[in-house]
Image (cartoon, rainbow, N blue to C red):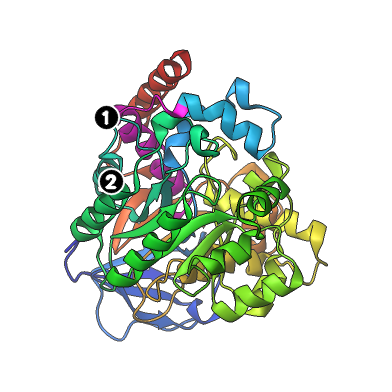
């Protein structure tokens, strides 16, 4: 679909996340076909050799939660120094003015920034469909194809506006019939269930405080019918817990179970405020949690119990979250944030650089229901991130793999997606970043001015 069966040997990297790859990996087409021990050579001739002696080799990083459109409202003055609910109420009227060109460009910006940071697969949670923006997901799909990045785009939704006791303005919500019909359309048009898929669709009501109980149930039924995944924000703040108790008479996880969402088809963003029994139930159900450390810190939301969730059986992945609560889209920097934040909650032996890198690779892949991504094993997709350690920040570093996290790597030198080089020498192939930045600046000013 994307490339021929050329054989490429990424040879003898400086360091790898997986010790049995010391001699590198061999890629044929879009798949890893050989994993080589130190000093070993490929079993068959190759068409290309990339000498990786100066590079740390990782599986492509996987972003489990994002809001691409928020790249238009980074460091937004009216939203500074606020917690989640007041932050949302200050931004919803702004986001209600989004237009098609804004979705196109903000998606390009988010995906380009992710790609340059070593990210090869990205999930986005888009839930704003004001009048005239009904085809937002279609626009995002087109931009992802242009950049050659894998995506899991979620058809988000909001059905409870301010008039119904929700947070968003009425102009941003849709009726349930419209939401469900469009969800089926998008699954039919874009969801690729096969291994190696470049695009998948999931269903993602925004949160318990922005959709009705009937929409949560109907989304779960639709996901079962079409064998797609479910996603939402949950247990992000104490305000959310109080809202659920007031609105439903239940804590957030109890409400999730009531509407048929406590299962292994689901992954949740944030997952901070769970008690011990809820952690146990999540693990038994196999429900995934996407940890979003930068956003959690910026909005003063709290610390996700990552290790307890893992021990209980929940997949734990990593996400940058929206660029209005991060305020960036850089996955390798998010790995460092997860490392440092984790050290505030757990001891040094519990949170290691290998652990947080595993969240950004295998953990996120499990959250997205992918067994063909997230590691450097034979049969996996050829999604590769290569980092050089030639910047001043790395001078004197001892362990190359640890240096990526501890010294603050921020950009990949080479990135491959499905066997195709998409970043070479720190630049996206055939892509004009300068022009993109200028378009984004102009649209951000337009959005802010109303």
Residue 96, horizontal then vertical, whole percent:
42, 28
Q: Is residue 386 visible?
A: no
Give the quadrant of the C terminus: top left
Q: Nearer the viewer, residue 166 or 186?
A: 166
Left of 390 or right of it: where is 415?
A: left
Tell me which label, 1 or 2, sits earlier in the chain: 1
Residue at image position (55%, 69%) is: 257
Q: Quadrant of residue 352?
A: bottom right
Q: Nearer the viewer, residue 423 or 110?
A: 110
What's the magenta region?
95-119
Kind of element beneath mark 2: helix
The relative height of residue 227 versus residue 396 in the rendered view (above or below) is below
Kind of element beneath mark 1: loop
Q: Is residue 273 visible?
A: yes
Q: Quadrant of residue 159?
A: top left
Name the residue beneath numbered marker 2. Answer: 178
**Most extreme residue toward the bottom, as rendered?**
43
Alpha-carbon neighbours of circle 1 within 10 Å: few (<14), some, or many (≥20)? few
Q: Nearer the viewer, residue 400 or 284?
A: 284
Q: Nearer the viewer, residue 355 or 133?
A: 133
The relative height of residue 430 versus residue 254 in the rendered view (above or below) is above
- Looking at the rendered structure, which numbered label has been put on residue 132? 1
Residue 317, horizontal then vertical, whole percent:
55, 64
Left of 14 or right of it: where is 382?
A: left
Residue at image position (55%, 64%) is: 256
Residue 325, horizontal then vertical, whole percent:
59, 38
- Looking at the rendered structure, which numbered label has been put on residue 281? none
Give the quadrant of the N terminus: bottom left
Residue 44, horizontal then vertical, whole percent:
26, 83
Query: Is most of the magenta stretch helix, strand or loop?
Result: helix
Q: Is residue 141 magenta?
A: no
Q: Is residue 114 magenta?
A: yes
């Amino acid at each position: 679909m994307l490339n021929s069966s050329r054989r490429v040997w990424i040879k003898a990297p400086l360091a790898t996340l997986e010790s049995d790859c010391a001699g590198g990996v061999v890629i044929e087409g879009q798949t890893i076909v050989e994993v080589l021990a130190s000093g070993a050579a490929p079993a068959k001739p190759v068409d290309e050799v990339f000498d990786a002696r100066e590079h740390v080799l990782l599986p492509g990083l996987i972003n489990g939660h994002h809001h691409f459109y928020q790249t238009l409202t980074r460091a937004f003055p009216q939203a500074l120094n606020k917690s989640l609910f007041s932050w949302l109420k200050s931004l919803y009227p702004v986001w209600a003015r989004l237009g098609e060109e804004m979705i196109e460009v903000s998606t390009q910006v988010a995906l380009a920034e992710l790609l340059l940071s070593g990210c090869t697969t990205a999930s986005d949670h888009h839930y704003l469909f004001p009048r005239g923006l009904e085809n937002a997901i279609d626009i995002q799909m087109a931009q992802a194809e242009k950049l050659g990045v894998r995506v899991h785009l979620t058809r988000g939704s909001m059905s409870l506006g301010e008039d119904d006791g929700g947070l968003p303005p009425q102009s941003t919500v849709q009726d349930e019939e419209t939401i469900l019909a469009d969800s089926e359309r998008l699954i039919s048009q874009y969801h690729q269930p096969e291994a190696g898929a470049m695009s998948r669709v999931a269903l993602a009501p925004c949160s318990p405080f922005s959709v009705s109980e009937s929409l949560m149930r109907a989304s779960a039924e639709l996901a079962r019918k079409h064998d797609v995944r479910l996603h939402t924000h949950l247990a992000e703040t104490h305000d959310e817990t109080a809202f659920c108790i007031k609105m439903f008479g239940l804590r957030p996880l109890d409400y999730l179970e009531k509407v048929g969402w406590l299962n292994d088809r689901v992954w949740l963003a944030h997952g901070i405020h769970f008690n011990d029994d809820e952690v146990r139930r999540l693990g038994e159900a196999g429900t995934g949690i996407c940890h979003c450390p930068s956003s959690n810190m910026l909005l003063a939301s709290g610390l996700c119990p990552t290790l307890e969730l893992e021990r209980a059986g929940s997949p734990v992945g990593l996400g940058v979250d929206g660029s209005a609560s991060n305020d960036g889209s850089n996955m390798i920097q998010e790995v460092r944030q997860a490392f440092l934040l984790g050290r505030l909650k757990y001891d040094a032996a519990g949170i290691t650089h290998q652990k947080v890198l595993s969240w950004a690779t295998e953990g996120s892949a499990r959250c997205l229901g992918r067994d063909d991504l997230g590691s450097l094993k034979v049969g996996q997709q050829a999604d590769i991130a290569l980092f050089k350690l030639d910047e001043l920040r790395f001078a004197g570093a001892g362990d190359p793999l640890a240096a990526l996290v501890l010294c603050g790597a921020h950009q990949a030198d080479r990135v491959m997606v499905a066997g195709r080089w998409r970043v070479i020498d720190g630049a996206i192939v055939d892509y004009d970043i300068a022009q993109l930045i200028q378009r984004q600046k102009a649209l951000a000013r337009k959005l802010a001015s109303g």
